[in-house]
Image (cartoon, rainbow, N blue to C red):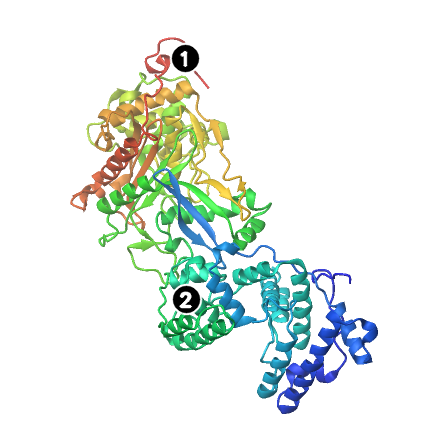
């Protein structure tokens, strides 16, 4: 007999008997009686179709029915089922799961991963002649007919395990159809109680059993069956309702789980309201198990006497229920549409993720993450009510771009109802497209890029500049590289503290972060070139707009994400090599094969001699300048830069060793002005909050040999004190 696939064969014309065609739409005793006649006749037809040569079938009507049945498609495969995705982070050098993400909470298991109690309960409760028939059970068809007479409709299904598996496969395929109308039609065809649907299921069930062993069919059913809500498959059900694996369930637990499959909502164990209905069905299954010899009478009696006692596993779906690093989880999840290994387009990647079964291994070090989180919570408490206090800490590995830490003071909550001011769905660390934050003005941390461009254009750290507060004509600034000119009212920058003006070396201006000195430097440079230097080090606005390059941008007016600044300062830690920050180290597909993760994108953004000289200047900042309160002073060389906006409402410290960078931001998140120098937070002056968070977090990083940095390369003497030939771009 030629096999026919449901994917490429149209269904034949239904049997031309009006009473049969309209059976599902009639009611009353006559419809039930016709159903009895039909099912009885169908049983005979199926027996004939399966076992009797056509020459022996005398009835023309039987011949026609057999022909119709034989013309139905019979090819269907088990295929891949939607499963949960898992996100991992690292603890003590080993990957550990932190979150499950799924459309359908399913974890497929092998035959040995399912308790014998579950296998026996399924056969006893759903298809007691499972091991005797070839996919359909004529005896059950006759029994179903009698039930339909009593109910005056098609209510008793006569479905074998194989037929139920077919139905679930067709439902699953319908749900994967992208066109809403086509999905609705396919879903309706898979669930609507009609005789034609039953015939199709029967024919496909026969084909299924020709291609798979009984064990494969039974396991396929247990892996696909629904157990209420988004819980699918026996492993997820065992975990959800009894907090155990499917291989470890007890006898009464096994019967309770199988009791759900026919009516998962009415016999669900999530609510005590359904316990009685579940127990009634459970006990019937236990009785059938005993009658079939699967368990002893004593086992049955003890199991029946066992009360319904689920051990419910709480919600698990999504980063909201992640065990740790929830904002890092959210960031990794938002990157899924960018993973080329999941498909050629963002739509294909999203669809592949929805089918599930993927494992994402992130670069987050939970040991360091937890330290940063504790420091943030202690120094920038989420319970602050006077203003919208926000804080974040991000660490990036120089030379790789791997994100080691992504933490913030607020808890994570992306639920529709939210949970108050102590939580937020906004990731302060990332760009708006990947977490909702528009970034924060960086203050003087942005001076790093002016300093870098200063050295790239042949200037030196020993050059003397004027830091005296004064007005600068806009026209005195150049934008030649991008064809810009500047005009308008004179620019009048201020220094952070009185007495900072006068002549000074660039090295001193950097150490003490003198604003006007850096504006003087910018006046001698090209503002577009400074922007290009920042861009080469990965800097961009969090809102996606182009970086501003007007004079005041020199001292940090662009709103930038902490992750971006951590990546930029890591460039200095890697001696001028910029690596775009990444969080996904590895992807494993549903088949267990490793797939490409986020690509490493590293470039020599700054010449090594320039980078080492910048590092030399920034080391003074951390040793004796504005950054010294944040220095852990643990004998690990460190270079960095502070940043404070006008009125000190946004506060930064970004720094790096040769093995780990760290950006700490503390500020007001609602746009209001709040001078942190005049505010006490957690018992200390708010200006010092960033130092306290940074110092303790960096000390922890340095205590790990993997992240403990070494000496920076020596600066280029030509760029320090002017000996030798000038060095230019």
Q: Residue at point 26% right, 29% down? A: 469
View extreme (left): residue: 683
Separation (CA) of disc 2 from disc 1: 80 Å
Label 2 CA crowd tier, 10 Å (few <14, some 14–19, many 20+): many
- Mark 2 vs mark 1, foreground winner is 2
Q: Which of the 4 image quarters holds residue 402?
A: top left
Query: In the image, 301: left or right of 679?
Result: right
Judge whether 298 appears above or below 333 on screen: below
Whether pointer 2 and pointer 1 mark residues with C-beta atoms closer than 8 Å, the reply is: no
Question: Helix or strand or loop: what does disc 2 sit on?
Answer: helix
Query: In the image, 338: left or right of 664?
Result: right
Q: Nearer the viewer, residue 430 or 357?
A: 357
Q: Which residue was labeled with disc 1?
A: 726
N-terminal of the pair, mark 2 or mark 1, is: 2
Judge whether 6 appears above or below 367 on screen: below
Q: Which residue was labeled with disc 2?
A: 253
Residue 501 in view = no
Percent of width and height locating residue 64: 80, 76
Q: Which of the 4 image quarters holds residue 395?
A: top left
View extreme (bottom): residue: 29
Q: Nearer the viewer, residue 645 or 382?
A: 382
Question: Helix or strand or loop: what does disc 1 sit on?
Answer: loop
Residue 374 in view = yes
State the mark number for residue 62: none
Q: Which of the 4 image quarters holds residue 57?
A: bottom right
């Amino acid at each position: 007999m030629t096999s026919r696939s449901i994917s490429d064969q149209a269904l034949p014309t239904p049997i031309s008997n009006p009473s049969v065609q309209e059976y599902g739409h009639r009611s009353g005793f006559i419809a039930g009686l016709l159903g009895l006649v039909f099912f009885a006749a169908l049983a005979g037809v199926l027996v004939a179709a399966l076992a009797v040569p056509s020459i022996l079938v005398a009835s023309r009507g039987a011949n026609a029915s057999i022909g119709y049945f034989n013309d139905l498609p019979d090819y269907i495969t088990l295929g891949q089922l939607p499963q949960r995705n898992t996100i991992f982070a690292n603890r003590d050098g080993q990957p550990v799961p932190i979150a499950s993400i799924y459309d359908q909470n399913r974890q497929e298991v092998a035959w040995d991963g399912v308790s014998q109690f579950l296998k026996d309960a399924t056969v006893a409760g759903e298809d007691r002649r499972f091991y005797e028939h070839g996919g359909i059970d004529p005896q059950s068809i006759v029994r179903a007919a009698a039930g339909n007479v009593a109910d005056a409709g098609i209510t008793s299904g006569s479905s074998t395990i194989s037929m139920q598996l077919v139905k679930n496969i067709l439902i699953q395929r319908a749900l994967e159809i992208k066109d809403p109308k086509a999905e609705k039609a396919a879903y309706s065809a898979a669930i609507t109680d009609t005789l034609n649907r039953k015939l199709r299921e029967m024919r496909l069930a026969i084909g299924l059993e020709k291609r798979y062993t009984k064990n494969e069919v039974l396991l396929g059913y247990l892996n696909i069956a629904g157990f209420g809500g988004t819980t699918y498959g026996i492993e997820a059900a065992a975990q959800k309702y009894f907090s155990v694996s499917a291989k470890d369930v007890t006898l009464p637990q096994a019967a309770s789980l199988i009791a759900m499959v026919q009516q998962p909502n009415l016999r669900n164990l999530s609510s005590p309201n359904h316990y009685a209905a579940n127990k009634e069905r459970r006990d019937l299954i236990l009785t059938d198990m005993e009658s079939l010899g699967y368990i002893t009478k004593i086992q049955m009696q003890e199991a029946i006497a066992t009360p319904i006692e689920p051990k419910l596993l709480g919600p698990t779906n999504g980063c909201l229920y992640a065990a740790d690093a929830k904002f890092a989880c959210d960031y990794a999840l938002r990157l899924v549409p960018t993973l080329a290994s999941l498909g050629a387009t963002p739509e294909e990647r999203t669809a592949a993720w929805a089918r599930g079964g993927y494992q994402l291994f992130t670069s987050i070090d939970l040991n360091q993450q937890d330290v940063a989180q504790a420091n943030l919570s202690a120094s920038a408490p989420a319970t602050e009510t006077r203003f919208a206090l926000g804080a974040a800490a991000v660490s990036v590995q120089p030379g790789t771009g791997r994100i080691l830490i992504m933490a913030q003071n607020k808890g994570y909550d992306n639920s529709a109802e939210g949970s108050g001011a102590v939580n937020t769905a906004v990731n302060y660390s990332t760009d708006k497209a990947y977490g909702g934050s528009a970034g924060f003005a960086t203050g003087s941390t942005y001076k790093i890029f002016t300093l870098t461009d200063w050295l790239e254009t042949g200037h030196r750290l020993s050059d003397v500049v004027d830091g005296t507060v004064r007005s600068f004509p806009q026209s005195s600034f150049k934008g030649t590289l991008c064809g810009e000119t500047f005009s308008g009212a004179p620019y009048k920058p201020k220094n952070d503290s009185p007495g900072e003006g006068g002549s000074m070396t660039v090295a001193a201006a950097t150490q003490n972060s003198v604003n006007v000195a850096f504006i003087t430097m910018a006046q001698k440079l090209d503002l577009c070139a400074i922007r290009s230097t920042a861009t080469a080090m990965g800097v961009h606005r969090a809102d996606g707009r182009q970086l501003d390059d007007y004079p005041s941008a020199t001292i940090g007016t662009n709103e930038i994400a902490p992750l971006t600044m951590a990546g930029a300062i890591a460039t200095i830690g890697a001696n001028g090599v910029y690596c775009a920050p990444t969080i996904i180290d590895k992807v494993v597909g549903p088949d267990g094969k490793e797939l490409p993760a986020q690509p490493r994108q590293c470039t020599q953004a700054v010449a090594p001699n320039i980078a080492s000289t910048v590092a030399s200047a920034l080391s003074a900042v951390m040793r004796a300048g504005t950054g010294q309160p944040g220095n852990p002073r643990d004998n690990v060389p460190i270079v960095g830069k502070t940043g404070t906006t006008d009125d000190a409402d946004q506060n930064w410290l970004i720094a790096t060793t040769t093995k780990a960078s760290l950006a700490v931001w503390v500020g007001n998140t609602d746009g209001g002005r709040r001078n942190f120098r005049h505010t006490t937070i957690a018992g200390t002056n708010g200006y010092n909050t960033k130092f306290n968070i940074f110092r303790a977090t960096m000390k922890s990083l340095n205590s790990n040999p993997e992240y403990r940095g070494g000496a920076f390369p020596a600066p280029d003497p030509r760029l320090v004190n002017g000996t030798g030939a000038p060095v230019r771009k």
